[in-house]
Image: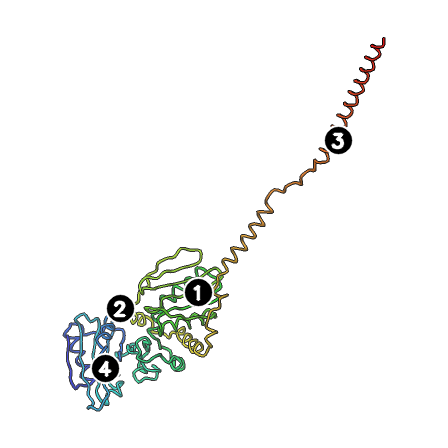
Amino acid sequence: MIIDLTDTTSSEIASALLKARRNAGSPAMGMVGTIVVVVDEASHHDAMKAANEAGREHPSRVLVAILRPGKGAAGLDAEVRVGEGIPGEAVLLRLHGELAKVPESVITPLLLPDSPVIVWWPGGGPRVPAEDPLGKLGRRRVTDAAATRRASVDYTARAEGYAPGDTDFAWTRLTPWRALMAAALDQYPTKVTGAEVTAARGNPSADLMAAWLQSRLKVPVEQRTSRGPGVTAVRLFTPSGVIALTRPDGAVATFSVPGQPDRPVALKRRTTSELLSEELRRLDPDDVYAQTLACMVERDSMPDDEKKVAATQRKSTAAKVSAAGKKVAAQNAASAAPVKSAPVKTAPVKKAAAKKSAATKGAAKKVATKKSATKKSAAKKAVKR
């Protein structure tokens, strides 16, 4: 059911919601919270669609506020939607003129009582979300640095103005990346000497990933650019080799660990509704995100040379270990080989034998000569006779 209200008030919108629920046959509210979406006219359709899809997991009242400040008269137009595939309730609000400068006066009466409020800025959000008039209403404040129109997000202001409950989709997109890298170090505990994050130019998730690795591992983290999409690779340099998670196509990643075959990992780029659903699962403060923001500010003040990973930190010591292993193996093989006895010098024996043989031959010759001489003497005597 869709109810259009022109030049209306918050009380009339609340009455229209009650009427729509009764007509739909569900007068009781079974919703767990209120999602306030602050968006412009051009992107309100996609934002409402994402919020309604997230509501299938978390039925909520979705209030989409389109702010139109200008010189025109102050006014409020609304479109109430209940049923027709919507898991909860959806209200599209258009605030005109001076009323757009005080949107909290319209939103506050429409919040569900005794339930959490999540404020989401699909277009980037204010510099300090907790100080925004609508941000003050939320228990959870969600921004998207990747959708900002500015050249870069002022993370210094975000870190200084951080309040429990602040988060960003650029951080949410890193959840599977962080889980896989943490699991790799749990499964293969080793010393990390450096890290590298590769992503498309200007990707805020890469900045957060580098800051998170530096804050947790206390090692230099270098950032490199690629064609994308998004983050394409994260590498950890260790003495045993490189632990790498690469995703060049934005869908399937390759997980590499030293000494193990490469494994494919499903790591597709998630939709906006999936990111919002994840943020709705946890409404407590994200302390790790706060620490990462602080580390990002620290990295901004660091010289570029300190962020680079040295060649000695990149180089794996596996080759050195292998060479040392080969040397030890050679030494072990040499020690295990049978000891060869020194060759016995038989030359003197041969010489002695040769001398004996020569002497024997000489003696034989002498004896033969004597015998021959004797025979000759006997023959001469016989002739004389």
In front of the other: label 3 or label 2? 3
Are the two marked residues, 1 and 4, in contact with CB atoms closer than 8 angstroms? no
Mark pair 3, 1: CA separation? 79 Å
Query: Which badge, 3 or 4, is on the more N-terminal residue?
Result: 4
| Whole-percent x, y for residue 182 in the image | 41, 65
Name the residue carrying label 3.
355
| Whole-percent x, y for residue 347 in the image | 70, 36
Camera-side residue of 295 and 312: 312
Name the residue carrying label 2.
57
Query: Which badge, 3 or 1, is on the more N-terminal residue?
Result: 1
Mark pair 3, 2: CA separation? 111 Å
**Mark 4 closeness class: few <14, some 14–19, many ≥20 residues within 10 Å:** many
SS at mark 1 in the image = strand
Question: What amino acid is labelled 4 in the image?
Answer: Ile
Name the residue carrying label 1.
236
Query: Which badge, 2 or 4, is on the more N-terminal residue?
Result: 2
Name the residue carrying label 4.
66
* Left/right of residue 53 with respect to residue 306 in the rendered view: left
